Each structure stands twice: as C-alpha cells, then as structure tokens.
Image (cartoon, rainbow, N blue to C red):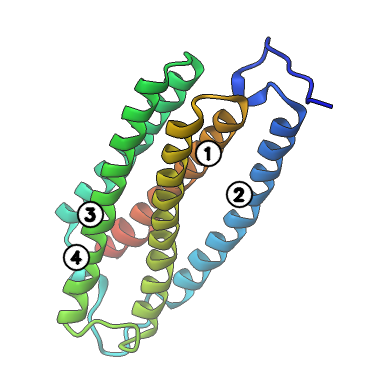
Amino acid sequence: MSAKIDTALPLEYQTEQNRMNILGFWIFLGAEIVLFATLFGVYGVLGHRHAGGPMQQDLFIIKDVMIQTMLLLTSSFTMGIAIFEMRRHQLKGMLVWLVITLLLGGGFLYMEIQEFTHYVHQGATMQTSAFLSSFFVLLGTHGLHVTLGIGWAVLLIIQLLQRGLTPVTARKTFIIGLYWHFLDVVWIFIFTFVYLAGLVS
C-alpha cells in the first residue's frame, strides 16, 4: 500500500515516513551535539597545557581563519537558498545552489588542510602538547564531518539528476541541509572559543 501523501505540507514532510526520518535525524544531531560538547570540554581542560611548545598566539593567523569562517557561513546561506528553491519545486535552481555550497565547503576544507600543514611544518603536531592534541582532534572531527557532508551531497545531486524532485529526494535534501547548518553552528563555536579566545588569552 502506498504511503499517504499530504500535499498541504512542504514536499519533504508529505509522507509519514519522511516525517519519521526527519525526526530521527534530529535525534542523531542530538548525539552529535554530545560528541562535540565532549570535544570542546576536553579542549577547555587541555587548551592551556602547552608543554613548552607553541601557544595559540604563536600559531593562529586570524585573517586566514576569517576567510575560512566566511566560506563556511556563506555555504550555509547558499544551502538555505537551495532548500528555498526545493520548496518552489525548482530543481535546476536547487542543483545550482547545492553545487555552489559544495564549492564553498571544498574551499573551507582546502584552507583547513593548508592550516594543518603549516602547523606541522612549524613542529606543531598532535604529539607536541596536550593543547595541540585536543586542537587537532576537535578541528579534525569537524573537518571530517564536512568531508562526509560533501560526499553525501555529491551522491544526493547524482540522485536528483536521475530521479528528479520527489518527496524522497526532497526529504534527503532537507536532512543534508540540517546537517550542513549544524556544522556551521559548530564552527561558530570553534571560531569563538578556540581561535578568538586563544588569541586574547
């Protein structure tokens, strides 16, 4: 028996299965919040233990971090436009904004890899100090999530090209939108409590 469709709702919410899947993803994000809260807590404890190695002020280049931040926050905006286009049933527009989002996310990842490479060349590795261990784990976990998000979105774009905009592909697009916005919120906390606080402490 086919699922009952409520056309009065946005496309991604039109079936009971979609609504349950979206609720399940919100629960998953709750677990992700616990994960990152734990990593922030570890960094809060270990962030001042430099063991004679470089400190935050010795490493962080605020201009580069600002560019990373603008790339990721802008990608959140473009993801929002992609969802808006989805709600208007504009597949072409949605795909264009999804691709722009991925390009911005890729730019963010490129800069983060360059940042890590620069630190390592300066002798700042995970083995150098507790500060650097907690720093690399926190930012590496976030970077891994961004990488997974980009791969996930590429697969979604392929599916949209093959199947078009349906309640199922709309639900998947909405869920990845939630995921992407979550990563941006985590980055705002990283920018504030790791970079800004590290430079003024």
Residue at 15% x, 52% y: name it. Answer: 63
Q: Residues within 10 Å of mark 4 (few under 14, many from 20)?
A: few
Q: Secondary structure at mark 2?
A: helix
Residue 108 drawn at (x, y percent):
27, 51
Residue 9 drawn at (x, y percent):
66, 15
Identify the image quadrant of the N terminus. Answer: top right
Q: Secondary structure at mark 4?
A: helix
- Observer-nearest residue: 177 or 60? 177
Pointer 2: what residue? Answer: 29
Residue 114 badge: 4
Left or right: 192 as drawn, with respect to 71? right
Residue at 24% x, 81% y: name it. Answer: 124
Pointer 3: what residue? Answer: 65
- Observer-nearest residue: 200 or 117? 117
Farthest-out residue, front: 162
Residue 131 drawn at (x, y percent):
36, 78
Left or right: 85 as drawn, with respect to 106? right
